[in-house]
Amino acid sequence: MGYTKTIHAVVRVREYLDEMVTGTGDLEWPSSDPRLAYWIREGIAAAGAKHIDLRDYATLSGKYILRSGEGKTIAELRNKLPLDELRARMTVKDAIDGASVIGAAMQYKRPEMFFPNAQLS
């Protein structure tokens, strides 16, 4: 089933599209209708098809992945760091001296660890 390319498809979900344009993280909207994700994708496709003044909306398909969940619609960023990369880095603010830095390094065993409050001199 193809998307409609009319301006009505954009107007119907414009408030969600505006939030996605200005958003910097994952977004979530409560919705009992699972078709909301489809309607948002349809609005993005319609904005890119014929309406030059709505080009900001057309780029959203490259920024977000839309999903329907139980009672909600989720827009997830496409360019999030993979979970393995997030787990590889760690900041330990509790380590304040050399012994606690060594203890934290032995306990957590991460490839990259940062100790912003450590006084090693």
Image (tube, rainbow, N blue to C red):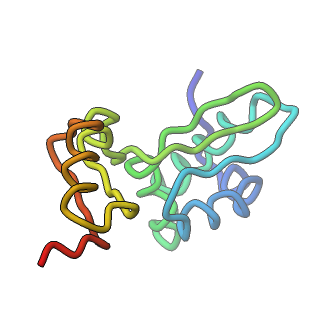
In percent of width and height, residue 58 lies at 46, 57
Residue 40, image x and y in percent? 64, 45
Identified at 64% across, 64% down, the residue is: 19
Residue pictured at 45% horizontal, 48% vertical: 77
96 horizontally vs 3: left or right: left
Q: Nearer the viewer, residue 50 or 74?
A: 74
* Figure label count: 0
Name the outermost residue toward the right: 32
Q: Which residue is drawn at 23% across and 60% down?
A: 114
Residue, x 41% and y 57% (percent of image)? 59
Task: Please determine whether, in this image, residue 84 is positioned above or below residue 8.
Answer: above
In the orientation shown, which residue stands out farthest toward the front? 99
Residue 109 drawn above or below residue 115 = above
Q: In which quarter of the image is the N terminus?
A: top right
Q: In this view, does 46 lie to the left or right of 99?
A: right
Q: Position of residue 107 (x, y in %)?
A: 28, 36
Front-most of 69 and 84? 84
Which of the two residues, 81 or 2, is positioned nearer the viewer here? 81
Q: In this view, does 77 lie above or below 114?
A: above
Q: Split into 4 quadrants, where in the image is the C terminus?
A: bottom left
